[in-house]
Amino acid sequence: MAVRIEREGVVATVVIDRPKRCNAVDARTARELADAFRAVEATIESGESFEGAQRFAGGAGRHGAPAS
């Protein structure tokens, strides 16, 4: 799998782990991300928040595609 969820206490971090592809998001990775975010969202209790990432992904997700 290209996406995993790391948990530390009440903090959940969704990680894209495709270093050979510069963490590019292809169709499979997009589905895995959506599943991971739904899984994390299902565990959020009243009063907790969902925050964005400090780093993201690059590239087109196609083998040999130039980075933009």
Image (tube, rainbow, N blue to C red):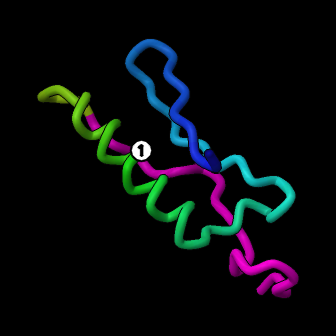
In this rendered view, identify the residue nearer to me: 11 or 6. 6
In this rendered view, identify the residue nearer to me: 26 or 8. 26
**Is residue 55 rendered to the left or right of residue 42?**
right
Q: Residue at x 86, y 58 (%)?
A: 20
Q: Main secondary structure of the magenta part?
A: loop
Callout count:
1
Q: Is residue 1 magenta?
A: no
Is 49 located above or below residue 9 in the figure?
below
Q: Residue at x 44, y 61 (%)?
A: 31
Magenta region: 49-68
Q: Quadrant of residue 58?
A: bottom right
Which residue is outermost to the top?
9
* Residue pointed to by mark 1: 36
Q: Is residue 50 magenta?
A: yes
**Is residue 65 rendered to the left or right of residue 2?**
right
Q: Quadrant of the C terminus?
A: bottom right
Q: Give coordinates of residue 60: x percent, y percent.
A: 69, 81
Q: Give coordinates of residue 11: x percent, y percent.
A: 44, 24
SS under mark 1 = helix
Looking at the rendered structure, the kind of residue marked 1 is Ala
Is 30 located above or below residue 39 in the figure?
below
**Is residue 65 rendered to the left or right of residue 15?**
right
In this rendered view, identify the residue nearer to me: 47 or 7. 7
Q: Residue at x 70, y 47 (%)?
A: 17
**Is residue 39 rendered to the left or right of residue 55?**
left
| Residue density around tag 1, few if under 14, some if 14–19, many if 20 or more, within 10 Å | some
Q: Give coordinates of residue 48: x percent, y percent.
A: 24, 30
Q: Residue at x 62, y 45 (%)?
A: 1
